[in-house]
Image: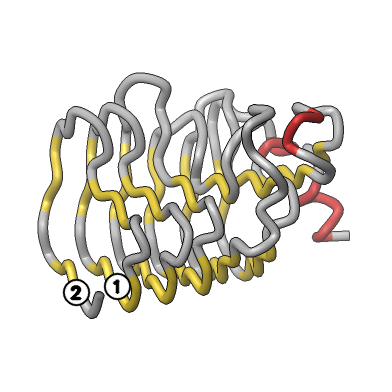
């Protein structure tokens, strides 16, 4: 706890570039760049991981399945502001985990996401909120030459076993109306 990670570059990590987990609290990741990680470039996960700020980072071009950031498993009071997310087909960020039957609704996960740029998700999606997380998404900029505008913000409701059947792929456009 009580850690500041500032002004470092992470390149070509075999798994996660930076993972904040295991009940870590009061963590700041600021002015870093994370590129080409094998799983997630920057992940915040696991019970009791809380009070994490991700600010002024460049999170770009992950390897493999192209995952930038996962915030899940009851990670609480996460703040993201002024980050640049570039060239990742998914998880820009994704809030809560996946569709597996082993996961239950993740209603304790919370995120405040402001003033970020999500750029070129290449046919995947920008930000996806799943299965009960509480999220504020304010003043972010989404653009992708090869991605569908309806995929900029996706909100999924219901239990994780329901796959994508309860996802609203047009959430950003409805919010603008």
Dot 2, how many residues are within 10 Å of its Cα: few (below 14), some (14-19), or many (20+)? few
Q: Nearer the viewer, residue 82 or 18?
A: 18
Image x and y of residue 58, in percent: 29, 53
Which numbered disc flags the more N-terminal residue, 2 or 1?
Answer: 2
Residue 116 is left or right of residue 34, and the answer is right
Question: Which numbered marker is on residue 27?
Answer: 1
Residue in view at x 85 percent, y 28 percent: 165
Residue farthest to the top, as pictured? 64
Residue in view at x 50 percent, y 62 percent: 75
Residue 176 is left or right of residue 29, and the answer is right
Relative to 58, does residue 101 appear above or below in the rendering?
above
Relative to 158, does residue 50 appear above or below in the rendering?
below
Say what secondary structure mark 1 lies in: strand
Image x and y of residue 142, in percent: 57, 49
Which picture quadrant has residue 87? top left
Q: Nearer the viewer, residue 133 or 6?
A: 133
Q: Quadrant of the N terminus?
A: bottom left
Mark 2 lies on residue: 4
Question: Which numbered marker is on residue 86?
Answer: none
Assess whether mark 1 and mark 2 are in contact (beta carbons under 8 angstroms).
yes
Alpha carbon separation for disc pair 2 and 1: 6 Å
Image x and y of residue 29, in percent: 26, 66
């Amino acid at each position: 706890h009580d850690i500041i990670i500032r002004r470092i570059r992470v390149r070509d990590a075999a798994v996660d570039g930076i993972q904040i987990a295991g009940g870590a609290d009061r963590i700041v990741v600021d002015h870093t760049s994370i590129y080409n990680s094998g799983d997630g470039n920057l992940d915040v996960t696991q019970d009791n991981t809380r009070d994490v700020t991700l600010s002024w980072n460049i999170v770009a071009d992950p390897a493999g399945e192209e995952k930038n950031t996962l915030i899940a498993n009851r990670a609480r009071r996460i703040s993201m502001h002024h980050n640049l997310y570039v060239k990742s087909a998914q998880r820009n960020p994704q809030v809560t985990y996946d569709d597996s039957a082993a996961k239950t609704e993740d209603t304790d996960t919370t995120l405040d996401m402001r003033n970020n740029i999500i750029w070129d998700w290449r046919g995947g999606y920008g930000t996806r909120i799943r299965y009960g997380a509480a999220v504020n998404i304010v003043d972010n900029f989404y653009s992708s030459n090869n991605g569908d505008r309806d995929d900029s913000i996706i909100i999924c409701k219901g239990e994780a076993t329901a796959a994508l059947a309860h996802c609203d792929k047009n959430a950003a456009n409805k919010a603008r109306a």
